[in-house]
Image (cartoon, rainbow, N blue to C red):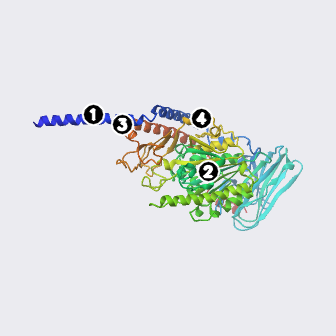
């Protein structure tokens, strides 16, 4: 009897398991019938092939050679940056009359005075740096700033230009207060056109100081007027803006502004944390390729940044940043002539707009440099909302305040008559979770609201107006778009993004329809290795996260893969049941992410072995030069 019952029980259990397995398969097939798996496989294979090809080419790319290959600027014409020609520099130190001239210590570095960092050509005082070059037929002007560090004392800065038969002192200024940046008026050298000349930069004193020449450059005048501004609002969710579907009017200024521009409805950030996202934007490389995977990583100077390219092309580059994870500590200062750290004056829902990145400091800078073509990076912060039911309301108020401050920039560009020649781009580095998944954070794991961000571009002289683009784009497309607008020959710059101009004008839509949006999923536990990432494709969003949580899942803390319908469930509160049970898809998705990250790691390894720029940004150089000055006197 017992044997018969056991046999019956085992048989019934086996039948039940078979029925359950059949039900699972049927349910998975039913749910997945809405998703074209073959298309996803094809798209992922195409992305892998493209990444693999770039990884094969990566050893031939590095920041030094790529920057040198850019050639003459189509916008600014002739551009001679003195700090790029130190190999041609002749230098000497003025010593006592009975002493032989000595070779000074000099070089390039990034130096901070007050809260403003600049790229400088440095030299000990009582030194002269001479550069010999052929000036073009077109008129050029000399632009530079200057300062010194060390003890107080009189330091005379002067610039002398000499030809075959004559010389002329074109600039002279004596200053006695150290640690203060000063900008010289542009020096017109049109009278020396089409001549071989020697330009001498001299800083003379009787004290122990180090002289700074900030970004000395010779630029052709009268070329095309073009400004590029990248405005980043930290942690701004696209769906909290009315123009992206929010039912509250939180961004009336931006909504009205973008009516005359181009709005991308589905823009994907490459990470849900500031450092990896911004590093990806500034290099047009995925986080796995540039090595910045979390807010603890620093961008290596082996990578060529957007600012470095624009600076080499003669643009004056400036950054005004309120988030330390988007500034010097993250390695994102590279290529900026001016880098202003405003992290001690972050926006709040009540702070005056004059304290924002769009406030007085930026406006004064724009007024001073309005005759130069500029690339400006602005990074403002929106306070993280508190936990609890008031979170959404507090967040919306902060967004509204930031929107009011943004208006100051628009007004200033109009007042200075710069609007029509300016490509103004507004993005966010990432979104954030507002408690929909139990977290008030942009991180871990990154559901759609944490990586879907606003992307808006207005360029009255060149872009169409009132255009909305539905295709999926990525924030790493910003850099190639800026280079495209500036007509930069960027064939030798390794980028994984695509220029958006063709899409803006309705070209090659098949390419964009077949494109995946990829993001890296940061983890706060480096021991939890795995293919962490997400992919946006059509109406679907799939992610692998080391820190999974979902209010509808009892597997919270154990499962790592989730698939959501972005159209039906844009906040990702309910996992698609078919995919939840589809082991084959999870396996294939994990294998794709693994291979994708391995190919990007090959790119990273190639850059780690490439030549570095060697530009120092520590305090050791000043101390060394001060000691050297004392020894030579």
Q: Residue 119 in the image: x percent, y percent? A: 68, 54
Q: Is residue 449 left or right of residue 496?
A: left
Q: Is residue 529 left or right of residue 466?
A: left
SS at badge 3:
helix
Q: Residue 508 in the image: x percent, y percent? A: 61, 34
Q: Are marks 4 and 1 in contact (CB under 8 Å)?
A: no
Residue 47 in sight here: yes
Q: CA distance from mark 3 to mark 1?
A: 14 Å
The front one of 152 and 215 is 215
Residue 118 in sight here: no
Callout 2: 10 Å neighbours few (<14), some, many (20+)? some
Mark 2 / mark 3, whichever is N-terminal: 3
Q: CA distance from mark 3 to mark 4?
A: 34 Å
Q: CA distance from mark 4 to mark 1?
A: 46 Å
Q: CA distance from mark 2 to mark 3?
A: 43 Å
Mark 2 / mark 1, whichever is N-terminal: 1
The front one of 485 and 74 is 485
Q: Residue 437 in the image: x percent, y percent? A: 43, 52
Q: CA distance from mark 2 to mark 4?
A: 23 Å
Q: Residue at x 35, y 34 (%)?
A: 26
Displayed quadrant of residue 497: top right
Task: Report the disc number at residue 426.
Answer: 2
The C terminus, quarter of image: bottom right
Callout 4: 10 Å neighbours few (<14), some, many (20+)? some
Find disc 4 in the rendering and name its residue.
509
Q: Residue 129 in the image: x percent, y percent? A: 76, 53
Q: Residue at x 33, y 36 (%)?
A: 24
The N terminus, quarter of image: top left
Mark 2 / mark 4, whichever is N-terminal: 2
Find disc 1 in the rendering and name its residue.
18
């Amino acid at each position: 009897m017992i044997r018969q019952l056991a046999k019956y029980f085992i048989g019934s259990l086996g039948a039940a398991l078979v029925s359950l397995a059949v039900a699972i398969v049927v349910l998975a097939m039913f749910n997945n019938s809405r998703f074209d798996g073959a298309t996803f496989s094809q798209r992922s294979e195409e992305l892998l092939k493209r990444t693999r090809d770039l990884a094969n080419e990566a050893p031939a790319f590095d920041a030094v050679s790529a920057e040198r290959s850019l050639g003459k600027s189509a916008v600014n014409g002739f551009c001679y940056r003195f700090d790029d020609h130190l190999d041609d520099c002749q230098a000497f130190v003025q010593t006592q009359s009975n002493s032989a001239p000595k070779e000074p210590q000099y070089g390039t570095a990034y130096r901070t005075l007050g809260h403003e960092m600049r790229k400088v050509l440095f030299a000990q005082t009582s030194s002269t740096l001479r550069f010999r070059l052929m000036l073009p037929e077109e008129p050029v002007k000399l632009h530079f700033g200057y300062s010194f560090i060390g003890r107080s004392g009189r330091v005379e800065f002067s610039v002398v230009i000499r030809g075959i038969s004559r010389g002329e002192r074109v600039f002279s200024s004596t200053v006695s207060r150290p640690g203060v940046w000063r900008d010289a008026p542009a020096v017109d050298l049109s009278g020396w056109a089409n001549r071989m000349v020697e330009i001498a930069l001299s800083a003379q004193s009787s004290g122990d100081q180090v002289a700074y020449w900030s970004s000395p450059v010779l630029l052709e005048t009268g070329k095309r007027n073009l400004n590029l501004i990248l405005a980043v609002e930290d942690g701004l969710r696209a769906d909290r803006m009315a123009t992206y579907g929010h039912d509250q009017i939180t961004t009336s200024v931006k909504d009205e502004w973008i009516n005359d521009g181009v709005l991308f409805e589905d823009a994907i950030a490459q990470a849900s944390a500031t450092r990896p996202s911004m590093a990806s934007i500034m290099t047009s490389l995925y986080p796995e390729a540039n090595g910045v995977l979390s807010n603890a990583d620093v961008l290596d100077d082996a990578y060529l940044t957007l600012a470095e390219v624009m600076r080499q092309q003669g643009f004056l580059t400036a950054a005004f940043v309120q988030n330390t994870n988007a500034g010097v500590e993250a390695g994102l200062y590279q290529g900026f002539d001016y880098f202003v750290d405003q992290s001690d004056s972050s926006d709040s829902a009540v702070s005056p707009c004059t304290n924002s990145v769009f406030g007085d400091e930026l406006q004064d800078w724009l007024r001073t440099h309005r005759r130069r073509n500029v690339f400006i990076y602005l990074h403002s912060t929106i306070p993280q909302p508190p936990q609890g039911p008031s979170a959404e309301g507090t967040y919306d108020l902060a967004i509204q305040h930031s929107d009011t401050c943004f208006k100051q920039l628009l007004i200033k560009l109009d007042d200075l008559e710069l609007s029509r020649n300016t490509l103004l781009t507004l993005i966010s580095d990432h979104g954030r979770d507002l408690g929909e998944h139990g977290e008030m954070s942009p991180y871990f794991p990154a559901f759609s609201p944490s990586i879907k961000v606003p992307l808006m571009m207005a360029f009255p002289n060149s872009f169409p107006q009132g255009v909305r683009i539905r295709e999926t784009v990525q924030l790493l497309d910003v850099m190639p778009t800026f280079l495209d607008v500036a007509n930069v020959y960027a064939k030798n710059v390794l980028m994984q993004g695509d220029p958006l101009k063709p899409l803006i004008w309705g070209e090659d839509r098949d390419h964009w329809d077949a494109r995946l949006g990829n993001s890296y999923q940061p983890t706060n536990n480096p021991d939890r290795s795995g293919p962490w990432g997400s992919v946006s494709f059509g109406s679907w969003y799939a992610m692998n996260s080391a820190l999974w949580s979902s209010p509808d899942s009892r597997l919270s803390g154990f499962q790592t893969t989730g698939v959501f319908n972005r159209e039906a469930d844009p906040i990702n509160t309910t996992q698609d049941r078919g995919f939840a049970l589809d082991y084959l898809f999870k396996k294939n998705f994990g294998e794709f992410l693994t291979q994708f990250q391995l190919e990007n790691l090959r790119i990273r390894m190639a850059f780690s072995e490439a030549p570095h720029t060697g530009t120092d940004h520590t305090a050791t150089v000043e101390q060394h030069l001060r000691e050297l000055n004392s020894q030579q006197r």
